[in-house]
Amino acid sequence: MKQVSIYTDGACSGNPGPGGWGAILIYNGVEKVISGGEAMTTNNRMELTGAIRALGLLKEPCAVTLRSDSQYLTRAVNEGWLRKWKAADFTKKGGLKNAELWRELDALLQVHDVTFIWVKGHAENEYNNRCDALAVAEREKFA
């Protein structure tokens, strides 16, 4: 399997409000930078969307290390929340927010071998900082 590194970040002004996401994919030293946004969204939706869009670009099953400063994203996968939500058909008492995005992410996780790693945001990680700048720039298009 090809080894791919992905960094993602999301940003939102207000919550909900205008938001953006950014991602950097790295394979064999080559970077692909992607970003996007929405006029009315939440930070968590943008965090999820960045990961989904990045994984969705992969043309074949890959071994991926995905780094994000979103505990919502990384803990949901690493601590088994996503597995429990899937077993309950993406529902939970009180309603599961972003269920359609969690379904989409889960489908991609069935294709790729993804390791999620939490990184501290707004710190010394060059790629996380670049993703943050991408997400903020996209958010500002809607502000």
Image (cartoon, rainbow, N blue to C red):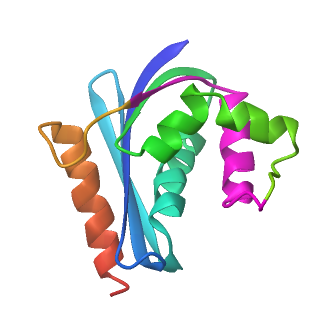
Q: Nearer the viewer, residue 108 or 85?
A: 85
**Residue at image location 29% in from the left, 31% down from the top:** 30
Q: Residue 143 in magenta?
A: no
Number of callouts: 0
Furthest toward the bottom, the residue is 143
Q: In this view, does 25 lie above or below 27?
A: below
Q: Quadrant of residue 93?
A: bottom right
**Residue at image location 86% in from the left, 35% down from the top:** 87
Residue 35, percent from left and from top: 39, 60
Furthest toward the left, the residue is 124
Residue range of the region highlighted in magenta in the rendering: 94-117
Furthest toward the front, the residue is 93
Q: Is 118 left, or right, of 73 in this rendering?
A: left
Q: Where, quadrant-wise, is the N terminus in this rendering?
A: top right
Q: Is 34 left, or right, of 121 in this rendering?
A: right
**Residue at image location 14% in from the left, 42% down from the top:** 123
Residue 122, percent from left and from top: 18, 49
Q: Residue 107 in magenta?
A: yes
Q: In which quarter of the image is residue 97?
A: bottom right
Q: Is 12 left, or right, of 92 in this rendering?
A: left
Q: Where, quadrant-wise, is the C terminus in this rendering?
A: bottom left
Q: Is residue 78 above or below residue 73?
A: above
Residue 73, percent from left and from top: 51, 43
Q: Quadrant of residue 24?
A: top left
**Residue at image location 65% in from the left, 28% down from the top:** 80
Q: Which of 65 and 74 is in front in this view?
A: 74
Residue 131, percent from left and from top: 28, 51
Q: Is residue 127 above or below residue 115?
A: below
